[in-house]
Amino acid sequence: METTEPEANVTRIMLAVNESSIKGYPHASISSRGAFEWTIQKIVRSNTSGFKLLFLHVQAPHEDGFEDMDSIYAFPEDFKTMKHRDQTRGLHLLEYFVTRCHEIGVACEAWVKEGDPKEVICRQAKRMRPDLLVVGNRGLGPFQRVIAGTVSEFCVKHAECPVVSIKRSPGETPRDPVDD
Amino acid sequence: METTEPEANVTRIMLAVNESSIKGYPHASISSRGAFEWTIQKIVRSNTSGFKLLFLHVQAPHEDGFEDMDSIYAFPEDFKTMKHRDQTRGLHLLEYFVTRCHEIGVACEAWVKEGDPKEVICRQAKRMRPDLLVVGNRGLGPFQRVIAGTVSEFCVKHAECPVVSIKRSPGETPRDPVDD
């Protein structure tokens, strides 16, 4: 007994998504895909008209500095090229999720922003006031966490909306955390 | 286009609920009711057959010690009486939520357990493997948090399933935190 609901009344779920950090692998990270699948399977379920997903991808400045270490930046255009490529990668990432939503039949919107991911996510959550923020969690060990911090822990603590952090199952964890 | 789904396939949401700590006021706390209403309005929505709610109320031993400070415990039966009354209050609390679920038409189960709430909640979450654990958050200030700790922070950190902590809106916050 499902009815078409006016947009003002849908549950708006913001998903913070990022790329796999595998070098040269411009795809959604395992943890982002896990967070998305959890949202669809466990929350949206068959009620596709009751939800709207808001995808946010935040690119840290110089996120892929490693693979650019050999590049020479002699002209302002060199930076523009890099920024353009970053943007393209971000769009490729969001295209994956938007296409999936389209297949499933759930409404969505998507953004690319630049900045410190944890801070931009919280700022956007404050601005857009989603009913729930879903963030993937790479499930780093205690030692790696100290080094890397985790975006999800920061969001759980600081975002003004309800937040759920979706840990990867052990079977999905790559041997090298950088492959996430 | 909703179908009756087999129970194995429903999304199981565990809600940790507690009593208002207003003296002699055996009702659901504001934060528990808020967590429940959020779950119904934002997650379950019209898809009542897609979800099952698992209510857990954990009674700390001597939870209402204050109002028993004048009592004399001279016989083992005195303790039994107190325990029986605690149990009755716990049932009264759960009855509220079970009745609401019945009205809404969403399946549910409910338990009373005794022990340290944060530890029992995590243990039960491990045992029952809900898809999501929802806990209310009294929204204590930094000073009060140091004194009281918060059950929700502990669960977010230690429960093995996804956890969402629902903060009260400022308008719902009683002047005296003990009234929650």
Image: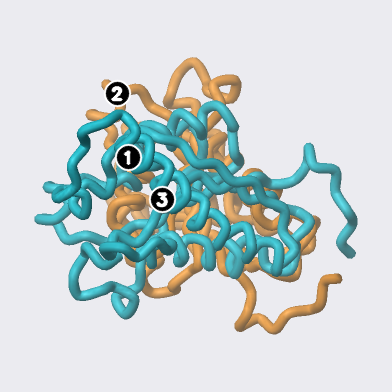
Chain colours: A orange, B cyan
Of the residues under marks 2 and 3, which one precedes in the sequence?
A: 3
- Taking depth in this image into account, of A150 and B160 the one nearest to the observer is B160
Position of A121 with respect to A47 (left or right) is: left
Disc 3 designates what residue?
A82
Can residue A120 be seen here? The reply is: no
SS at circle 2? helix
Instruction: Give me the C-alpha separation between circle 2 and circle 1.
Output: 31 Å
Q: Amino acid at mark 1?
A: Ala
Instruction: Give me the C-alpha separation between circle 3 and circle 1.
Output: 58 Å
SS at circle 3? helix
> On residue A142, which mark appears?
2
Q: Relative to B157, does residue B68 appear above or below in the rendering?
A: below
Q: Amino acid at mark 3?
A: Met
- Say which of marks 3 and 1 sits in front: 1
Q: Residue B144 appears at what percent x and percent y?
A: 14, 55
- Say which of marks 2 and 1 sits in front: 1
Q: Residue B164 appears at what percent x and percent y?
A: 45, 51
> On residue B60, which mark appears?
1
Tag count in the figure?
3
Neighbourhood count class around disc 2 (C-alpha, 10 Å): few under 14, some 14–19, many 20 upward: few
Same chain check for tags 2 and 1:
no
